Image (tube, helix red, strand yellow):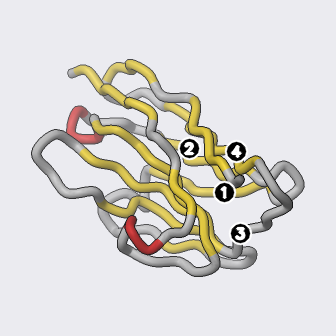
Amino acid sequence: QVQLAESGGGLVQAGGSLRLSCAVSGRTFRPLCMGWFRQAPGSERELVGAITWSSTNQPDSVKDRFIISRDNAKNTVYLQMNSLKPEDTAIYYCAAGSGCFAKWDLYAYRGQGTQVTVSS
Protein backbone atom coordinates (compact mmCIF):
# COMPACT_ATOMS: atom_id res chain seq x y z
CA GLN A 1 0.00 0.00 0.00
CA VAL A 2 1.51 3.28 -1.12
CA GLN A 3 0.77 6.30 1.03
CA LEU A 4 1.55 9.98 0.63
CA ALA A 5 1.82 12.20 3.67
CA GLU A 6 2.01 15.98 3.36
CA SER A 7 3.39 18.21 6.08
CA GLY A 8 4.56 21.76 6.57
CA GLY A 9 1.32 23.68 6.15
CA GLY A 10 0.21 26.37 8.53
CA LEU A 11 -0.56 30.03 9.02
CA VAL A 12 1.85 32.62 7.67
CA GLN A 13 1.74 36.35 7.04
CA ALA A 14 1.76 37.75 3.53
CA GLY A 15 5.31 37.93 2.23
CA GLY A 16 6.40 34.96 4.31
CA SER A 17 7.56 31.50 3.30
CA LEU A 18 6.58 27.92 3.92
CA ARG A 19 8.10 24.64 2.85
CA LEU A 20 5.78 21.73 2.24
CA SER A 21 6.98 18.15 2.25
CA CYS A 22 5.36 15.00 0.92
CA ALA A 23 6.82 11.62 1.74
CA VAL A 24 5.93 8.50 -0.22
CA SER A 25 5.83 5.35 1.87
CA GLY A 26 4.72 1.79 1.46
CA ARG A 27 5.89 -0.82 -0.97
CA THR A 28 8.94 -0.08 -2.99
CA PHE A 29 7.75 2.62 -5.31
CA ARG A 30 9.82 5.21 -7.06
CA PRO A 31 7.36 7.44 -8.89
CA LEU A 32 8.45 8.96 -12.16
CA CYS A 33 6.44 12.07 -11.41
CA MET A 34 5.52 13.84 -8.20
CA GLY A 35 3.33 16.88 -8.13
CA TRP A 36 1.69 19.51 -5.98
CA PHE A 37 -1.85 20.75 -6.40
CA ARG A 38 -3.90 23.27 -4.48
CA GLN A 39 -7.56 23.95 -4.03
CA ALA A 40 -9.00 27.15 -2.61
CA PRO A 41 -12.61 27.37 -1.43
CA GLY A 42 -14.94 27.62 -4.39
CA SER A 43 -12.18 26.91 -6.89
CA GLU A 44 -11.04 23.91 -8.85
CA ARG A 45 -7.96 21.97 -7.86
CA GLU A 46 -5.01 23.27 -9.83
CA LEU A 47 -1.49 22.08 -10.47
CA VAL A 48 1.25 24.21 -8.94
CA GLY A 49 4.18 22.04 -9.87
CA ALA A 50 5.28 18.66 -11.12
CA ILE A 51 8.71 17.11 -11.15
CA THR A 52 10.22 14.06 -12.78
CA TRP A 53 13.71 12.64 -12.40
CA SER A 54 15.10 15.36 -14.63
CA SER A 55 12.62 18.15 -15.22
CA THR A 56 10.07 20.39 -13.59
CA ASN A 57 6.89 22.01 -14.78
CA GLN A 58 5.21 24.90 -13.05
CA PRO A 59 2.52 27.34 -14.16
CA ASP A 60 3.52 30.94 -14.76
CA SER A 61 1.30 32.02 -11.88
CA VAL A 62 3.65 30.56 -9.27
CA LYS A 63 6.98 29.67 -10.87
CA ASP A 64 8.63 32.91 -9.78
CA ARG A 65 7.72 32.27 -6.14
CA PHE A 66 7.36 28.50 -5.71
CA ILE A 67 10.13 25.95 -6.15
CA ILE A 68 9.43 22.26 -6.48
CA SER A 69 12.16 19.76 -5.73
CA ARG A 70 12.57 16.15 -4.77
CA ASP A 71 14.91 13.96 -2.78
CA ASN A 72 14.90 10.60 -4.50
CA ALA A 73 16.77 8.90 -1.68
CA LYS A 74 14.01 9.91 0.71
CA ASN A 75 11.21 9.50 -1.85
CA THR A 76 10.05 12.95 -0.88
CA VAL A 77 8.89 15.96 -2.86
CA TYR A 78 9.06 19.50 -1.56
CA LEU A 79 7.37 22.77 -2.38
CA GLN A 80 9.20 25.87 -1.23
CA MET A 81 6.76 28.75 -1.27
CA ASN A 82 8.11 32.27 -1.03
CA SER A 83 6.53 35.73 -1.08
CA LEU A 84 3.22 34.21 -0.14
CA LYS A 85 0.03 36.09 -0.87
CA PRO A 86 -3.44 35.80 0.66
CA GLU A 87 -4.64 34.30 -2.63
CA ASP A 88 -2.27 31.39 -2.07
CA THR A 89 -4.52 30.27 0.76
CA ALA A 90 -5.68 26.76 -0.07
CA ILE A 91 -5.36 23.12 0.78
CA TYR A 92 -2.21 21.80 -0.84
CA TYR A 93 -2.10 18.21 -2.03
CA CYS A 94 0.66 16.05 -3.36
CA ALA A 95 0.37 13.32 -5.93
CA ALA A 96 2.61 10.68 -7.46
CA GLY A 97 2.47 8.45 -10.47
CA SER A 98 4.08 7.08 -13.57
CA GLY A 99 3.51 10.26 -15.55
CA CYS A 100 2.96 13.96 -15.04
CA PHE A 101 -0.53 15.29 -15.63
CA ALA A 102 -2.35 18.55 -15.10
CA LYS A 103 -5.36 16.68 -13.76
CA TRP A 104 -5.37 15.46 -10.20
CA ASP A 105 -7.49 12.41 -10.96
CA LEU A 106 -4.90 10.98 -13.32
CA TYR A 107 -2.31 10.42 -10.60
CA ALA A 108 -2.23 6.92 -9.19
CA TYR A 109 -1.45 8.03 -5.66
CA ARG A 110 -2.73 11.14 -3.89
CA GLY A 111 -2.34 12.68 -0.47
CA GLN A 112 -4.93 14.03 1.95
CA GLY A 113 -3.74 17.61 1.85
CA THR A 114 -2.32 20.22 4.18
CA GLN A 115 -3.85 23.63 4.85
CA VAL A 116 -1.93 26.77 4.00
CA THR A 117 -3.38 30.05 5.20
CA VAL A 118 -1.81 33.38 4.31
CA SER A 119 -2.98 36.36 6.31
CA SER A 120 -2.87 39.90 4.98
Mark 3 to mark 1: distance in Å?
14 Å
The residues tagged by marks 4 and 3 sit, at their Cα atoms, a distance apart of 11 Å
* x and y percentages locating residue 16 in the rendered image: 42, 27
First in residue order: circle 4 vs circle 1: 4
Asked if labels 3 and 2 touch by Cβ distance under 8 angstroms, the answer is no
Residue 87 or residue 23, whichever sits in front: 23
Q: Could you give the CA–CA distance between mark 2 and mark 3, rounded to whole angstroms?
A: 20 Å
- The three-letter code of the residue at mark 3 reads Pro
**CA distance separating discs 2 and 1:** 8 Å
Report how far apart the C-alphas of labels 4 and 1 lie in the structure: 12 Å
Residue 80's mark?
Answer: 2
Residue under numbered circle 1: 69
Q: What amino acid type is highlighted by mark number 4?
A: Ala
Amino acid at the residue labelled 1: Ser
Q: Is residue 91 above or below residue 70?
A: above
Whichever of labels 2 and 1 marks the residue nearer the N terminus, that label is 1
Residue 61: where, in percent of width, then height?
30, 61
Q: Which residue is mark 3?
A: 31
Question: Along the line of sight, which residue is nearer the eye, 116 or 25?
Answer: 25
